[in-house]
Image: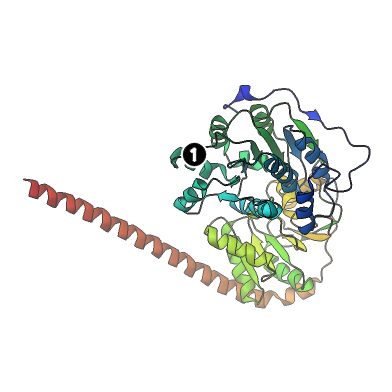
Amino acid sequence: MAAGEEEGSAAEPEQEPAAEEQPRSFKDLGVTDVLCEACDQLGWKVPTKIQIEAIPVALQGRDIIGLAETGSGKTGAFALPILQALLETPQRLFALVLTPTRELAFQISEQFEALGSSIGVQSTVIVGGIDTMSQSLALAKKPHVIIATPGRLVDHLENTKGFNLRALKFLVMDEADRILNMDFETEVDKILKVIPRDRKTFLFSATMTKKVQKLQRAALKNPVKCAVSSKYQTVEKLQQYYIFIPSKFKDSYLVYILNELAGNSFMIFCSTCNNTQRTALLLRNLGFTAIPLHGQMSQNKRLGSLNKFKAKARSILLATDVASRGLDIPHVDVVINFDIPTHSKDYIHRVGRTARAGRSGKSITFVTQYDVELFQRIEHLIGKKLPAFPMQEEEVMMLTERVAEAQRLARMELREQGEKKRSRNDDDDTEEAIGVRNKVAGGKKKKRKAF
């Protein structure tokens, strides 16, 4: 990482020694009473492994590298030490949390506000897809905590008058491996250049890649490594299955499983925005309460889908990998990999949406004749052979006619949506062209008058 290489120590981080007797409550970790009460109100009865490792070290004022599996309570591990430090030395623009996705930013903000509600903590989310003027006004009020995606934050640092982070005391990089995979390195460099070197830095990541190690050297001083998962693994209470099926019958098998496991809430992962939208329309045509979540939707629609699913107003959420990391939706009973992930590590993050915080859950991965090699890679990564999900093939085949009709309707709806979108874009282009013509014509008139 180019920026601030000299800023941190290149030495390997210390490994925090395992405590002989595990603390049993947040109070045992050194968390102050008012924040212990907030944890209790959120239903956090006992700290998670990463919280037990990271919170005491963070309260001592050390930089941290936290390596933990998905759904392990990382937000609490950095939010509680920050809020405790804020209580001790109140200050505006106190902490910055960088995250890779907009949805994760809103979720972290919710947790900060819930934990800090009794002490009056104000947080602001700065992400793309939202009007910059309203964000500038929110920044002018100087919140205590800013949760941001790197690109939009750099935009404000460069263009919003009067906004700077020169007094910042805490920097958190959550899902650091994914921030760097999404090519935010340049933006992170710019941010590191304009924030104080005398600060505390917490770097949380599911995996320790070369890019993350480089970022660690650039941004952290003598950090303590808090690792609760040294190898890729899925949680113990997760029942994992696969189904080997012919590619052309994928939709029928999906409908069969949704009927078989009716009464549960489902997250279904698709590989593309188009397939997510198509499958959502298909399921709606068959009477399922399904909603999509993908990158081609507007930010308001994305949040709307997420909130409907969280509020249990919809039981099926179809998503691309935009929702596979970090999102905490407590009641997901079943994760279905409708399209197998190309990167094996994404499998861990997808199935980590269920069986969270000690609950049980199921995951089912669809494997077609084209996916065998990818599936074998996943089994190799997690170190176990998955059992086949029990199926009644003849019952699946009985669904094919109804599914074919729903597929036809879904294709028509997709086409209509595409045409509406194109016509809106054409209207926008026409308006823009008319505006340009009028400006040019106006300019010519003025010139004639001048002569």
Q: Residue at x 86, y 56 (%)?
A: 237
Task: Give the percent coordinates (x, y) of residue 221.
Answer: 69, 27
Residue 8 shows in this picture = yes
- 397 and 175: which is toward the camera: 175
Residue 80 percent across, percent down from the top left:
73, 45
Q: Is residue 174 above or below residue 322?
A: above
Image point (79%, 70%), residue name: 261
Which picture quadrant has residue 420?
bottom left
Residue in the image at 74% along x and 70% along y: 258
> In this orientation, which residue lies closer to the viewer: 165 or 407?
165
Q: Tell me how the rendering is colored.
A: rainbow
109, above or below 277, in the image = above
In the picture provided, is 228 more to the left or to the right than 416?
Answer: right
Mark 1 belongs to which amino acid?
Leu
The quadrant the C terminus occupies is top left
Q: Pointer 1: residues within 10 angstroms few (<14), some, or many (20+)?
A: some
Q: Is residue 21 left or right of residue 204?
A: right
Which secondary structure, mark 1?
Answer: helix
Question: Mark 1 sits on what residue?
Answer: 157
**Quarter of the image with the N terminus in it:** top right
